[in-house]
Amino acid sequence: MQSSHIKLNVLGITYSQIQAGAYALILGEESGPRRIPVIIGTPEAQSIAIFLEGLHPPRPLTHDMFVSFMDLYDIRMEEVFIYKFEEGVFFSEIRFTGDREVKLDARTSDAIALAIRCNAPIYTTEEIVREAGVMLEESDYEVTDDEVPTDDLGEESILENKTLEELQSYLEDAVAAEDYEAASRIRDEMNKRQQN
């Protein structure tokens, strides 16, 4: 990493205010108040949210499988570098080491989904932070109970009328069916009740 690079942290995911059916992955500069919203699709948002929320799918997701492949061949993910921002699109590369060092071009959403699983740092340039960065209040990017899409099983109005035992059963069913959006909402409803 060059000294001019800025380290970013993943702060959360929220609905995109710009693009319907998409999500904004919020990255924050480690030593400053600026935030970078990266528009990502539902599958990538789901993969990132599942990892951040500590859910364990019964079968590996694509990003989990890739990390297992890396482990098998003793490949280490060193960093993600977001090197360009053009027409609203972020361009990233991933640096790997193993028998040799390799840099691969990657979609930013995939690169970050892997970085959080590998505990790899994420960097960008001051120019990109200046161009794409915004100042957000914490409540603007905080992941809440209604941030991840779900089907009827995860609708808040339905969950409110269920017992904890029913919720636990629904949670197990949702995970088994790989419906992680619903599982996330069910788990959040259970946590909310246990805190009260």
Image (spheres, rainbow, N blue to C red):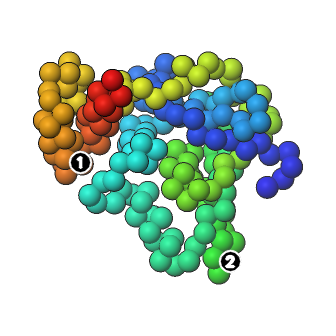
If the image is split into quadrants, where does the C terminus sit? top left
Q: Position of residue 117 (x, y in %)?
A: 51, 56
Res 30 quadrant in image: top right
Q: Which residue is mark 2?
A: 100
Vertically, is 166 above or below 55?
Answer: above
Q: Earlier in the sequence, mark 1 or mark 2?
A: 2
Say what amino acid the circle numbered 1 marks.
Val
| Mark 1 or mark 2, whichever is nearer to me | 1
Q: Residues within 10 Å of mark 2 (few under 14, many from 20)?
A: few
Q: Secondary structure at mark 2?
A: loop
Q: Position of residue 4 (x, y in %)?
A: 85, 45
If the image is split into quadrants, where does the N terminus sit? bottom right
| Residue lying furthest bottom | 99
Q: Residue sitting at 62 percent across and 35 percent down?
A: 27
Q: Is residue 150 left or right of residue 120?
A: left
Q: Do the numbered discs 1 and 2 sit on residues whose CB atoms are within 8 Å?
A: no
Vertically, is 48 above or below 151?
Answer: below
Q: Residue sitting at 59 percent across and 56 percent down?
A: 119
Q: Residue sitting at 48 percent across and 36 percent down?
A: 40
Vertically, is 25 above or below 138?
Answer: below
Say what amino acid the circle numbered 2 marks.
Arg
Q: Is residue 34 left or right of residue 173?
A: right
Q: Is residue 186 visible?
A: yes
Vertically, is 148 above or below 6?
Answer: above
Q: Is residue 109 left or right of residue 102?
A: left
Q: Which residue is mark 1?
A: 175
Q: CA distance from mark 1 to mark 2?
A: 38 Å
Camera-side residue of 22 and 67: 67
How many numbered discs, if any? 2
Q: Residue sitting at 35 percent across and 48 percent down?
A: 55
Mark sitting on residue 53: none
